[in-house]
Image (tube, rainbow, N blue to C red):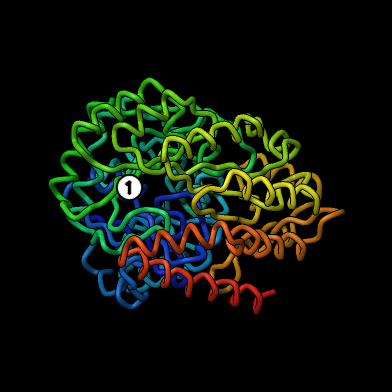
Amino acid sequence: MMKTLFLNPPSYEGFDGGAGSRYQARREIRSFWYPTWLAQPAALVPGSRLVDAPARGLAPDDVLAMANDYELLVMHTSTPSFPSDIKIAEAFKAKNPKLKIGLVGAHVAVLPEPSLSASTAIDFVARAEFDYTIKDVAEGRPLAEIAGLSYRKDGVVTHNPERAMIDAMDDLPFVTEVYKRDLAIDDYFIGYLLHPYVSLYTGRGCKSRCTFCLWPQTIGGHRYRTRSPESVAHEIALAKSYFPRVKEFFFDDDTFTDDRPRAEAIARLLGKLDVTWSCNAKANVPHETLRIMRDNGLRLLLVGYESGSQKILNNIKKGMRVEFARRFSEDCHKLGITIHGTFIVGLPGETRETIHETIRFAKEINPHTIQVSLAAAYPGTELYRQASENGWLRNSGAALVDGHGLQVSSLSYPDLSPDEIFEALATFYKRFYFRPRKIAEITLEMARSQEMLRRRLREGVEFFRFLAERRSAA
């Protein structure tokens, strides 16, 4: 077995590159997800080490000091961070020419040949679902024999056959073992989750066909492949013993509620463990399932509403009716389930009116907190294909973030300019949060808890700094 370093490389300050979640830009407040996509293959490679440079605050010189300690370097990369990640790889190769370097992530899964052509420092890229692909490399198998791999042979990029998707999800080792070995739980912070928290996946893939969503179209697929409820409960029990200070567990599956009987079964097992947990959900979960989950420790649902316009939802193939989302939200409020709602401005068909319609909808359903993103066309998605064919991409879609890791508007429409889309994000936040009802909610929340008071004040400073940075970048 090769001595292997798994690295989430240094990048913009406060930028985790989507290593564990699906948001490849700096957030409005300091946020770091666990690098779960790297932790999973690391759990398959004995003696390996996982280093999460952004979360640890490590600079390039800090990680380069490890170059001579390893034989294999596996780096997670993303479309926004790819240029800087290549520079890190080249620095590692310059310091240790014998080091074999590979890249993983959605960007290289979709663009393996351009990724390898970007630098001779890159020896291979692992496409799509790469866990066992990396294990094979670490075991020293010839690259030509490893399914799911692209590599350079005699100066020519070669693509091996695809690797079958993983169906036996219970066979994968627990990522929490790697978390315990290599990570510090206090490094990971998400504004809407209790701190400290632990996140992991209980399954991969998503049945929905949203045109903008990166991961199901590049890595996970559209078939929801899951671990058994017993396996999930076993890992949570283990994590609870490993991390007794953890206040919340988050299931980062694209849509945890896609399999409702399984979600209910997991909830009942978690109820016996007396843990607080949250998950991603679509706004179509029936009241009874919500009640079962709530009664067994569910605190919060992260819900991708995307838009309050039915036209926009239809355009992106969301498979959701606005009235269903409205009823779902009412059920959550009645049951006392907190909602963190996510929205996107600048999707196909967006107009000034649909933006205002979505803001009105968000205020009406009133999630506890929200995240608003600019529509981004990532290579490998249906949205990218549409944008390319219709001339919506600015600068060929190359600029998704600015020099500080903040999202920029990469799409342009005949009746809606990039500047209008860019400004809509700040307008959305201001109209949602700067209203008496929401101010009163947050004030009451802070009055009930000194910890929450300190946290919200810090987040407020970070949020206003974020808005100021965006104004200066405009």
Residue furthest right in the image: 414
Q: Secondary structure at mark 1?
A: strand
Residue 333: give x, y in percent of width and height.
Answer: 48, 39
Quarter of the figure with residue 261: top left
Q: Position of residue 317 (x, y in %)?
A: 67, 33
In this orientation, which residue lies closer to the viewer: 370 or 120? 370
For this view, does 175 lie left or right of residue 252? left
Find residue 243 and report its horizontal and vertical position in percent: 17, 52
Residue projecting furthest to the left = 241
Residue at left offset 71%, top offset 65%: 423
Considering only vertical position in the picture, is 462 above or below 418? below
**Would residue 118 be seen by someone viewing this image from the given angle?**
no
Horizontal arrangement in the rendering, residue 450 relative to residue 396 (left or right)? left
Residue at the far top in the pictured view: 261
Give whichever of 173, 261 is nearer the camera: 261
Residue type at mark 1: give it. Ser
| Vertical arrangement, residue 346 with respect to residue 278, above or below | below
- Residue 364 in view, yes or no: yes
Q: Which residue is mark 1?
A: 199
User: Residue drawn 42% across and 45% down?
Assistant: 126
Residue 310 position, x and y percent, is 72, 36
Report the side of 87 relative to 320 (left or right): left
